[in-house]
Amino acid sequence: MARAKENNSIFGILIEGVKIYCSNFLQFTQYMAFPVLGQLLGLGLIFGLAGLYTAYLPVLIEKSPAFNSFSTIVACVILITVPGMIFFLKAFWDFLVAYGALNSMADSALNTGRVYDFPAHNSLITQRTFKYVGLWFLISLLSLIAINPFFIIIAAVLFIYFILVFQVFTFEDDVSILGCFRRSMEIIKGNFARTFILMCIIGFFTHFLFVEGFSVLFDFARITELLTKPFENWIMTNIPLDGFNNWILNLNPRAEILTPTKVADLFVYQIAFFVVTGFTLPLRSICWTLWYKGLNTEAPAAKPARKSNAKKLDKNIIKRAQRKED
């Protein structure tokens, strides 16, 4: 498949992005399955096993006095939670890598019309692990600063200017960590309003409309009710809502109190939100990759991405895919 013609129009980007995402939906779903569901499973193992241990601890102490020791209890909790923690951290790292690797997959789809050879795309990011971790560290630091109410407006503006940092990192491997932010700002400069509109459209569909639709599907299939029960029991056992409600009522007597059912429903909604936004991450990455490629040539003092590495990667991916087909 020949490379698609670069399109700078918002709706052109959206249409092309949806087309690529839908035509490779199974591949993208397969790629995101472990990073998304693995995190949920890891957290489920951590809190589930820890909850079971806490529930049966009195019985264990009654049967064996050795369990009636603080050091023994701590050691058992650590041993119980380590497997789930390892599982969660591996899935979480794969999720972070996906932010860069999906851009390479989108470029591959534009060149070949297909998405394959996930390890090759991941290696484009993991071979620069130290630099990539530094990029995420700086993003996390800026996010913490943005929590301050005095910086919300400034942070929102900078978020638009820095929205292409992962595309810059993926396609311009000679740019430093700070250079990724600087290049993204250069590319967005003069296209701030259009970038903001594109972000709002993508965010509305992937962070709201799809999430609400998925929640309705959960309710219809009675999955919400099935998930709410365990959360509700865990909250009643481990979270002192009475003390929290008394504190809230002292501040505002008209405030609505929290119940285990309400908190459990919120947890289930957050799970649906995480699943939907996680599995639609490829769609967002595709759209922003198309946006990057469309605006990159217009950016002042723009330097073309280093094509030599990209071509080598594409050839390797194609050769490996052909061997698999043969």
Image (spheres, rainbow, N blue to C red):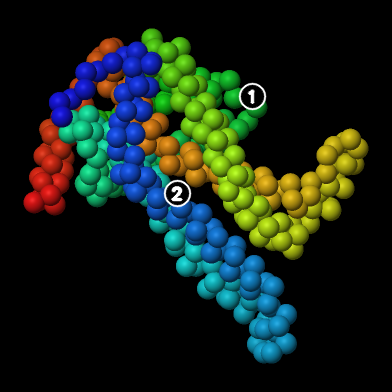
Report the amino acid beneath label 1.
Answer: Phe
Rendered location of residue 326, percent (x, y): 8, 51
Q: Nearer the viewer, residue 91 or 279?
A: 279
Q: Nearer the viewer, residue 55 or 167?
A: 55
Report which residue position mark 2 lands on: 36
What is the crowding at mark 1: few (fewer than 14 residues within 10 Å), some, or many (at least 20)?
few
Rendered location of residue 289, percent (x, y): 31, 27
What residue lies at 40% left-to-right and 56% top-to-bottom? 90
Mark 1, secondary structure of its residue: helix
Report the amino acid beneath label 2.
Answer: Val
In primary-sequence order, the first of circles 1 and 2 is: 2
What residue lies at 21% left-to-right and 22% top-to-bottom? 4
What residue lies at 64% left-to-right and 67% top-to-bottom? 51
Q: Nearer the viewer, residue 240 or 31?
A: 31
Rendered location of residue 103, percent (x, y): 30, 34
Rendered location of residue 287, percent (x, y): 36, 26
Report which residue position mark 1 lands on: 150
